Image (spheres, coloured by chain):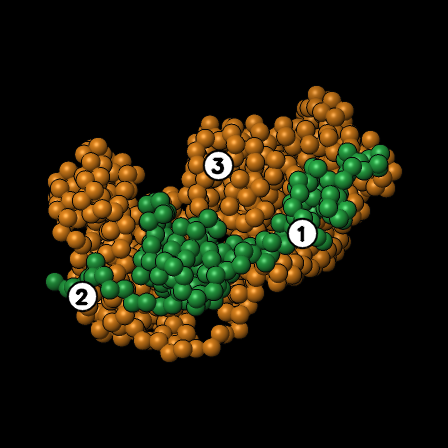
């Protein structure tokens, strides 16, 4: 398995070693799930696991717990401990913990190129001798050191370097070892962790004797005159510091351009224009180029001028059965509706967005955005760390729901999950929304923005009050700014577009098929009739909007695409466009998102989220309409 | 409050009685000594907000790192000048859970740290790690300016 601090390049090494692509990005918390692959070498091959990064084996957030449990499971196999060569001391801290677990280790000093540039020199043979395990210099994106790691994995050994704790700690470790069962694997580490206060660990190990250990911990703290945790921690840090000092030499270097930029990006004054510039660049690329130029080209030229007429005439000529012909090219046809929407309207927008997004991810800007947005997020009872999943939600809310694992408390995780489901439009939907907004006045767009942001802030603040539990500190590591690698950007964008094609297009086709069936059997008009008080009476939309809202239950971007098509053909006036924008933005993102919430937090939470989101969407939509009615002429 | 013109101390509410019909809702106060009209930042939300924004931007005046103070030069990290190396000497004000969390990034007594910025969020450099942090944390970290080597041999590594 791979083990290491967050953002040290584990996934990049995993990709180079196993040949399997996993997502690599320049922010801590990219990997939240274990991925497995195989390292092969002349016939002999071994399984390799990529794991979420951890700050310490004293796990705090659920993604860290996953990794810690593998280490403590007793048989992690050979472990490739990945250390950021720029930050040896921190890596050694983790190495010492891993040494206490007694697992066989090979150390990879990754990011050796960046260490060189910063004038940091590490005496690799000496480090290897001190630790008693193979140490390999590596630069994952350039595949440097990969072959050597492959060879050395066969020589993994337990780390010999030991932290010398005060005798009182050693005695307590022995006693705790007896309580949790001294023969279990990694019992020394488990004992130290529980003395340092990791209660969740004991539960995870299903060890009885919480009370006994708590007593030992208290007694130790009393004996030392300090909390046991801080004594243990300090001893480890001191050991790591000394070892690092022995093998490390540094030449002073001048501040490089990326370093200066990194500083400006979080500067209290310069940070804002930079943020504005970044957003504007994304808007130009996705909103203007993707949603404008590319969509026009695909919808009007490719589908409108070419595919749809050709397919329609082919179908009418070769398929005489009207039902099937209608199913393919009718009003609710698979080609004329599902494919036109998903390929012509959504795909260009999604692709440009994914590309822009990958660039942002790899540059290292996102954690800096979190710093800039910490303050506004506090209004929603969250801290800047929650910016990461929220921004990822602009890519895909379902994936982002999984990334909430990087947050430390369940309360924050559920809060962010709720806000993601409520008002963070995913790339597919964002694109369609941008398209719809093109025809609106600035004032109407402002109404939309104020309503969405206001709803999110209000719901976030309310959830912060109502949900039980605590919030965590804001502690976020800021990785260096890097020039994104072309290969990684391309791979990541393609992987995401592929995901889109696989997940979204089937849903569009199924949705269309359902509409087709409803329309064909006459059920559609019954539903339209039944929902008319809501759709026509309360929201003031034309009755045809019902079908867009219906498919919006499957995916809100599909609903948005339907409304977009209505707006383009003049079926909606600007009040109706604004109202429907508000309603679909506040819809649940998609079925997959609901399923993900069920998977992560159980069906009760999922139900609660759904029960909040849909009524709120209709409520806000109706209120916006009333607002426009109260002030007619204000926005025309 | 203090009159900005004559520095006379007075209660804002006991300002000059105005004959203006909107007097009760007025955010201006008059100095009873010299009659100077000023803004009561407590009453005017806008002025109060701007004032806080200004002080937030300039920040509390940091203590100069070179000048030794009574406690062997010990200050809370929040008061350290930006861009100066300092050595952590005391973390006992911090909750153990928080100390453990930050310890994983290398923060402990004896560690060398540097405050990179205060706003919008304090950024602390520990070794090669830049950390964005809660501002409350800075008050719990006591440092002495300058890089000091620790002399306590509390932990040592040795190979078996
Ligand atoms: N210069 C340089 N950059 C690297 C190296 N290895 C990885 N990177 C970059 O470092 C960043 C983090 O890489 P990842 O592989 O996602 O890191 P990780 O350890 O999997 O991170 P988490 O999953 O968040 O714990 C990416 O931007 C990589 O391109 C290296 O050896 N040199
Ligand atoms: Mg990773």
Percent from the top left, x then y, of residue A582? 69, 38
Mark 1 Cβ inside 8 Å of ligand 1: no
Disc nearest the viewer among 1 and 2? 1
The chain that hosts pointer 3 is A
Q: Is residue B105 left or right of residue B57?
A: left
Q: Is residue B21 visible?
A: yes
Q: Which chain is green?
A: B
Residue A536 versus residue B56: which sits nearer the camera?
A: B56
Residue at 69% x, 26% y is: A524
Q: How many numbered markers are drawn?
A: 3
Instruction: Name the residue beneath numbered marker 1.
Output: B7
Judged left or right of residue A564, residue A38 is left
The image shows residue A564 at horizontal and vertical percentages of 73, 43
Task: Kindly report the distance in space between the C-alpha atoms of the residues bearing marks 2 and 3.
Answer: 44 Å
Q: Position of residue A214 (x, y in %)?
A: 22, 36
Q: Chain of mark 1?
A: B
Q: First in sequence: mark 2 or mark 3? A: 2
Residue B54 badge: none
Residue indicated by mark 2 = A132
**What is the secondary structure assignment of the residue under circle 2?**
loop
Residue A137: quadrant of the picture = bottom left
Residue A158 falls left or right of residue A474: left
Q: Are marks 2 and 3 in contact (CB under 8 Å)?
A: no
Instruction: Find numbered disc 3 in the image and state the secondary structure of the residue it sits on.
Output: helix
In the rendered image, the vertical position of residue A60 relative to residue A294, given as above or below? above
Chain the render paints orange: A
Q: Dot 1: within a 10 Å radius of its alpha carbon, few (fewer than 14), some, or many (20 or more) residues?
A: few
Residue sitting at 24 percent across and 51 percent down? A231
Residue corresponding to mark 3: A414
Rounded to the nearest angstrom, the CA distance separating label 1 from label 2 is: 71 Å
Q: Report whether mark 2 lies on the same chain as mark 3.
A: yes
């Amino acid at each position: 398995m791979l083990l290491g601090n967050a953002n040290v390049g584990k996934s990049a090494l995993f990709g180079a070693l196993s040949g399997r692509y996993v997502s690599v990005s320049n922010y801590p918390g990219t990997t939240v799930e274990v991925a497995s692959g195989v390292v092969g070498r002349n016939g002999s091959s071994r399984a390799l696991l990529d794991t979420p990064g951890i700050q310490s084996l004293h796990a705090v957030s659920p993604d860290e717990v996953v990794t810690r449990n593998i280490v403590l499971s007793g048989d992690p196999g050979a472990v490739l401990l990945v250390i950021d060569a720029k930050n040896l001391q921190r890596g050694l801290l983790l190495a010492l913990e891993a040494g206490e677990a007694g697992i066989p280790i090979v150390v990879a000093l990754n990011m050796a190129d960046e260490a060189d540039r910063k004038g940091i020199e590490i005496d690799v043979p000496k480090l290897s001798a001190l630790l008693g395990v193979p140490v390999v210099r590596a630069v994952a994106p350039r595949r440097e050191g990969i072959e050597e790691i492959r060879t050395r994995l066969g020589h993994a050994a337990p780390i010999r370097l030991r932290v010398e704790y005060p005798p009182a700690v050693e005695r307590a470790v022995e006693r705790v070892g007896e309580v949790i069962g001294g023969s279990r694997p990694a019992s020394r580490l488990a004992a130290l962790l529980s003395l340092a206060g990791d209660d969740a660990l004991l539960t995870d190990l299903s060890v009885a004797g919480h009370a006994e250990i708590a007593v030992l911990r208290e007694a130790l703290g009393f004996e030392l005159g300090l909390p046991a945790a801080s004594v243990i921690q300090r001893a480890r840090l001191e050991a790591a510091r000394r070892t690092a000092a022995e093998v490390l030499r540094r030449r002073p270097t001048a501040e490089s351009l990326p370093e200066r930029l990194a500083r400006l990006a979080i500067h209290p004054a310069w940070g804002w224009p930079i943020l504005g510039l970044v957003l504007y660049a994304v808007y130009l690329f996705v909103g203007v180029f993707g949603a404008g130029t590319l969509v026009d080209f695909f919808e009007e030229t490719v589908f409108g001028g070419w595919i749809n007429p050709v397919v329609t005439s082919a179908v009418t000529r070769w398929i005489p059965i009207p039902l099937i012909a209608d199913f393919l090219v009718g009003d609710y046809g698979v080609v004329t509706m599902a494919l036109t929407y998903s390929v012509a309207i959504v795909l260009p927008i999604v692709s440009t967005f994914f590309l822009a997004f990958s660039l942002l991810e790899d540059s290292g800007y996102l954690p800096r955005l979190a710093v800039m947005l910490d303050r506004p997020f506090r209004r929603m009872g969250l801290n800047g760390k929650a910016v990461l999943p929220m921004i990822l939600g602009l890519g895909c809310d379902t994936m982002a729901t999984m990334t909430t694992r990087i947050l430390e408390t369940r309360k924050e995780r559920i809060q962010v999950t709720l806000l993601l489901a409520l008002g963070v439009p995913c790339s597919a939907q964002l694109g369609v929304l941008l398209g719809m907004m093109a025809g609106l006045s600035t004032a109407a767009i402002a109404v939309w923005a104020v309503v969405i942001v206001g709803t999110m802030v209000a719901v976030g603040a309310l959830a912060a009050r109502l949900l039980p539990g605590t919030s965590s500190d804001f502690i976020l590591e800021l990785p260096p700014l890097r020039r994104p690698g072309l290969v990684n950007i391309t791979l990541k964008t393609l992987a995401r577009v592929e995901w889109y094609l696989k997940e979204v297009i089937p849903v569009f086709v199924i949705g269309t098929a359902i509409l087709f069936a409803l329309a064909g059997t006459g059920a559609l008009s019954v539903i339209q009739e039944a929902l008319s008080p809501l759709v026509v009476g309360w929201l003031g939309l034309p009755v045809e909007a019902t079908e867009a809202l219906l498919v919006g239950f499957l995916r809100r971007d599909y609903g948005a695409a339907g409304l977009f098509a209505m707006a383009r053909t003049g079926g909606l006036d600007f009040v109706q466009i604004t109202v429907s924008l508000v309603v679909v933005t506040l819809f649940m993102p998609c079925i997959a998102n609901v399923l993900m919430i069920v998977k992560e937090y159980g069906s009760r939470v999922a139900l609660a989220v759904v029960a909040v989101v849909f009524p709120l969407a209709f409520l806000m939509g109706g209120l916006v309409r009333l607002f426009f009615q109260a002030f007619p002429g204000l926005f025309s | 409050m203090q009159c900005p013109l004559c520095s006379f101390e007075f209660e804002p509410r006991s300002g000059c009685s105005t004959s203006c019909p909107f007097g009760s809702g007025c955010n201006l106060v008059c100095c009873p000594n010299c009659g100077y009209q000023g803004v009561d930042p407590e009453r005017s939300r806008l002025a109060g907000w701007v004032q806080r924004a200004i002080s937030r931007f300039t920040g509390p005046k940091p203590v100069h790192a070179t000048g030794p103070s009574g406690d062997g030069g010990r200050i809370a990290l929040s008061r350290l000048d930006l861009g100066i190396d300092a050595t952590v000497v005391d973390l006992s004000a911090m909750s153990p859970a928080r100390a453990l969390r930050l310890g994983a990034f290398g923060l402990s007594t004896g560690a060398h740290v540097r405050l990179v910025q205060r706003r919008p969020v304090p950024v602390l450099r520990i070794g090669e790690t830049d950390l964005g942090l809660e501002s409350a944390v800075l008050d719990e970290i006591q440092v002495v300016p300058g890089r000091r080597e620790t002399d306590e041999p509390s932990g040592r590594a040795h190979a078996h």
